[in-house]
Amino acid sequence: MRSVTQTAALPRGRHAASREVVAESQRGRMLVAMAEAVAAKGYARVAVADVIERAHVSRRSFYEHFANKEECFLASYDAGVDLLLGAIDRAVAAAGPDLTAGAEAGTRAYLETLAASPAFARTFLIEVLAAGPAALARRAAVHARFAEQLAGIVGDPAVPPYVFRACVGAIHELITARLVTGGAGALPELLEPVLDIQLRLLGR
């Protein structure tokens, strides 16, 4: 399972990478560094200095990409969410048209992706709550995206949209509690309970 926090190494040599490639690598390292720093220290205690130290970039490079800590945090959050949703979509597509198989495949991909990226899991589920109004708005939008994704898997227009939002909220609550008590590595153990929540709330 690909980790949310994996980054590609740059080729070595004076002319091995273009300016654009170097900038992309720097940005990727800073997004990873932000998630790791926030997971280790908590959002409120993280400073830009923590990010540039972990990412091995200069302060100037940081401010070429981001206006401040909050902007970097939101970009890190968004990048991780995109990878997480992508992993779910690929798993569901590979499972075929069967609803139960698709739900199981998507749930497994979700849990395993979080388990493979402990820093992002904590950032995604816990620290985002302490990152201010913009982060809370982003979290609400992400929950809406997850609800839409779940609606697409179910494919039943008779199910009201609020049911999918409620399902997403219940799943996040269960997973957050397990993350706090057992760590990210314990999240795949929730496969059956999360599937049970989906099937019960959606009347399947």
Image (cartoon, rainbow, N blue to C red):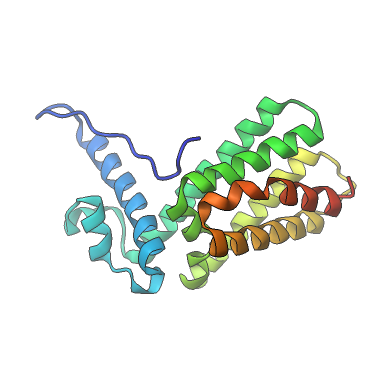
Residue 135 horizontal side relative to residue 36, left or right: right
Residue 14 horizontal side relative to residue 134, left or right: left
Residue at point 25%, 42% (across, down): 23
Percent coordinates x, y for residue 45 in the rendering: 34, 73
Residue at point 21%, 57% (across, down): 53
How many numbered discs? 0
Residue at point 59%, 51% (across, down): 187
Occupied quadrant, residue 96: top right
Percent coordinates x, y for residue 95 in the rendering: 71, 27
User: Most extreme residue toward the left, as rendered?
Assistant: 14
Occupied quadrant, residue 139: bottom right
Residue at point 52%, 50% (across, down): 185
Above/below status of 157 relative to 90? below
Q: 70 and 172: which one is in front?
A: 172
Q: 25 and 113: which one is in front?
A: 113
Percent coordinates x, y for residue 19 in the rendering: 20, 36
Percent coordinates x, y for residue 20 in the rendering: 25, 36
State whether residue 88 appears in this view. yes
State whether residue 63 appears in this view. no
Residue 172 horizontal side relative to residue 158, left or right: left
Residue 73 horizontal side relative to residue 68, left or right: right
Above/below status of 85 relative to 65? above
Quadrant where the C terminus sits is: top right
Above/below status of 12 relative to 118? above
